[in-house]
Amino acid sequence: MRPIELTVNGSSHELEVEPRELLVYVLRERLGLTGTNIGCDTSSCGACTVLVEGESVKSCTMLAVQADGREITTIEGLATNGELHAVQQAFHEQHALQCGFCTPGFVMATVSLLDENGDPSEQEIREGLEGNLCRCTGYHNIVRAVQSAAGQEVSA
Amino acid sequence: MLASTELQEGRAIAATEAPAGGYVGARETKHNGDLFLTGRAAYFNDIVLPKMSHAAVLRSPHAHARIKSIDASAAEASAGVLATLTGAQIKEHTGPIPFFIDPAVFGGKTRDNFPLAVDKVLMTGQPVAAVVAETAADAEAALDLIKVDYDVLEPILEADDALKDGAPIINDGWDDNVVITLPFVEGDAEAALAEADHVIEDTFEMHRLSTQPIEPRGNMAVWEKDGSLTFYGSIQNPHPLRLHLSQALGVSESAIRVIAPFVGGGLGLKMHGHPEEALVCVLAKIVGRPVKWLEDRRETLLIGGIEQTHRFKVGFNNDGQIVAIHNRIVANVGMLGSAPGWGMAFLSALGFPSGYKVPVTDVSVQVVSTNKGIWNATRGYGKQGTNVVIERMVDLVARHLGMDRIEVRRKNMIEKDEFPYATNSGLNIDSGDYHAALDKLEELLDYEGLKREQAKLREEGRYLGIGITFELTPESADIPGTIVGGFDSAQVKMDPSGNVTILSGVTTPGSGNDTGLAQIVADEVGVTIDRISVIQGDTDTCPYGFGNYSGRSIVSGGNSAVLAARDIGEKIRGGAALLLEAGDEDIELIDNLARVAGAPDRAIPIAAVAETIYTLNFAIPGIPEPPLESTRVYKPDNIRHTPDEKGRIQPYPTYSYAMHGVVVEVDPETGAVDIKRIGIVHDCGTMINPLFIEGQMAGAMVMGLGNGMSEELKYDEKGTPLSTRFKAYLMPRAGDVPAVELVHQITPSPFTLLGTKGAGEAGVGGGMSVIANAVDDALAPLGVTIRELPVSPPNVLKAIDEAGSNGGRG
């Protein structure tokens, strides 16, 4: 077991973890942050996407020990004082979620995408979200939500 | 114990007044969206029970083998292991898994499927043993210690091989490998083909695919201290599963509670009949603790569907009129499992001739069992088999005659004044205006402009393709003698605070019918949607219902909510009339108020009326009786189970339809298909929420395009699955598709209360058919005819090569 310290959604946690333990399991099972979902075992679906130091990371591709000393944001930590983050609000208004299982991953990937490129084209949005799979929406309303969150006019 | 999460219920996030014109038809957003957007929605894997243990399943590495012996003793002694179970022991604990739809109901063959293979395995991945341990990792590690001695048999993987004379019979006790053969015959096809001006004979092969929701399956069972069983699962049909668990386990239905939390996509794959449902119940009994099993993606990818070959003849006249279709379909359902997948083959034949007036049809499907994986339902439930092949036929006719494909469709489609229209297979199509939908699609796409652009690009050596297809979607089925039910239930309750709870027999694995139910009830009882909660997916609290499949949730569940809500509205009106000294008929219920029509100052909060009914019922003579609760069932019209003179039944109340158009560019060097545009005209009758219907259609279309372009469950020659990960089973990503341009057309169904038809499946068959036709059209100058799906790069290159080797004759 290795001691690590994680700052998750602003709270500091000192933990003992197995060297093989993946970040996603620490978030879900140790810290009870079950909003981060697991959809595959091969880093293909992106349902487990979180922010590490503000950048999107598939939390099934990172060992918990690699996250030692770093700041992590999960879907539970995005809203402030009960106010949805602009990306969460846009996903709601544009009906960018159906079953909702991939949604936390898409929201976190979108926060990271817009942080890197505040005014993306539709093509840049589609390419920027290629790491995440959605089986319900056909991506149509997800793209519109990203446009809306970027303050752009939403295409029809 | 659902730490900081909530089960399948929720409350709207924003208090509002009702939209002008009411909630029904408004573009309401998800009423409980905040749960999903903040990570508080509880899915199966988020449920934690005290003393929970974990199961893992050992699966056969062989497609066809006899089990000589299993030794689980080393696993039993492994770290953290609580119990092991093998096929040799399974019959001591459970009977066979009941079929969701038993082929025997239709005169076909059946088999006993136990949760663990008893003596013979029929597919790679069939469960043969299970381990329960303290952790999932301990359970999985112990699987490696189980020794199974197999006598490996030659697998039969292709349906045509299984049908050969003298082919080995894979199911013990059967006399061949055919589950059932289902014919649908109207008229004399041979004679009609002989008289037709032209006949085309060809084949079409549809590959094996799967729906693969992003959340895998999972089940957990716990035997309570009173001997009752609680089952949690990512499942679509709680009440029917309760019946089947009762039958398998020999436990009273009343002693079983089935709970489906929020489901991360169902798509047919989470209809039950899988081995792991009864298995976790048996294991939980053995260890005396809750047992949880969570599927991994390799396991999800064992489940397939659709694989079928059509060998057809289509007869038509010089004017483009199609006069006869003869089609022999062979469907490879793999190992016959208890899940409802095999029935999709039935639908692929039943659906002919779709929305076309073809006077003579002779279509039959042979359902063949092989050593590939089981089928389960795939969104579209086999209708994509009909849709793809009939739309290929129409394009073949058009090309043969040099007519425009739109003209051939116009010529053959059912006219709007011919509904309800009885089809050759006995279906009764409720309503529609197919020609108007085609006109709208032509306009949406600028079809003539596209053809000019295509001609111009062809001169530059570029291959633009335009695909046009019609899609008919029979929905909300009731199949007699099975738990495929066409009716459903709703309970609507108003408490003394004026808040409303809807308990529904239908479930929502992502379709959003819960928000639709809330909209419907809000209008009927006059409260704003933030005062409404929806509870689904719990057999102890919800009225009896069949859950989710066949685009049924609003047709059956929504309309039953209308009836129940009207009962409540009537009592509120009665109470308000008394309190406001007006007639019942003068009271209108809106924005949480009961008010006298035309006299806005004479109003009382609905909550006050409810409180009065509950608290002053003895004091006020004539006030309506409590409780403010009503449970109602809605049975749609048009379903007919009394066989007609030809023995045919009519299992569907409603028939949604759509016209699809896509534009693609194909690179003949690489075989890559680039989708440029997607256009759809969709009619599902009255819409409760256009925003949700657009979401469903966009999702179904992209799923259909993926099903048709890139997704394929492949096997090697030994029957070992090759598509075992999302890196090998290629579902569309955001960059693979463009925006979806969607136009609504509304033709209410005369057979449902609100005029709604099923929604949610349309688009899957459309996506598959329209991509086949678009690629075919793109490569027409090379003499290519598309005869198989998927139109993946290797298959496209193969089609180009074949066209080249026969001199470009297709």
Image: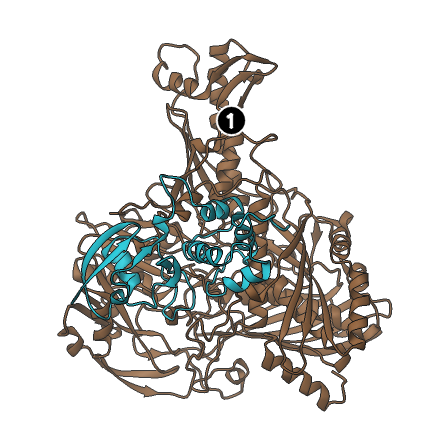
Q: Nearer the viewer, residue B438 or B632?
A: B438
The residue at the far right in this view is: B318
Q: Quadrant of the C terminus of chain B?
A: bottom right
State left or right for residue B245 relative to residue A3: right
Q: Nearer the viewer, residue B766 or B362?
A: B766
Callout 1: chain:
B
- Residue drawn at point x = 77 percent, y = 62 percent: B409
Q: Nearer the viewer, residue A57 or B633?
A: A57
Mark 1: secondary structure:
loop
Chain identifier for the cyan-coloured part of the image? A
- Residue drawn at point x = 64 percent, y = 50 percent: A156
Vertical position of residue B663 compared to residue B596: above or below: below
State left or right for residue B196 relative to residue B356: right
Q: Nearer the viewer, residue A118 or B736?
A: A118
Vertical position of residue B767 compared to residue B41: above or below: below
Residue where numbered disc 1 is placed: B526
Local packing at callout 1 (Cα closer than 10 Å; few below 14, some 14-19, many 20+) is many
State left or right for residue A57 relative to residue A90: left
Q: Is residue B216 visible?
A: no
Residue B436 horizontal/vertical position (percent): 76, 51
Vertical position of residue B600 compared to residue A48: above or below: above
- Residue drawn at point x = 26 percent, y = 64 percent: A64
The residue at the far bottom in this view is: B805
Residue B56 horizontal/vertical position (percent): 27, 69
Residue B630 horizontal/vertical position (percent): 43, 31
Q: Is residue B283 visible?
A: yes
Q: Colour of chain B?
A: brown
Image quadrant in which you'd find residue B148: bottom left
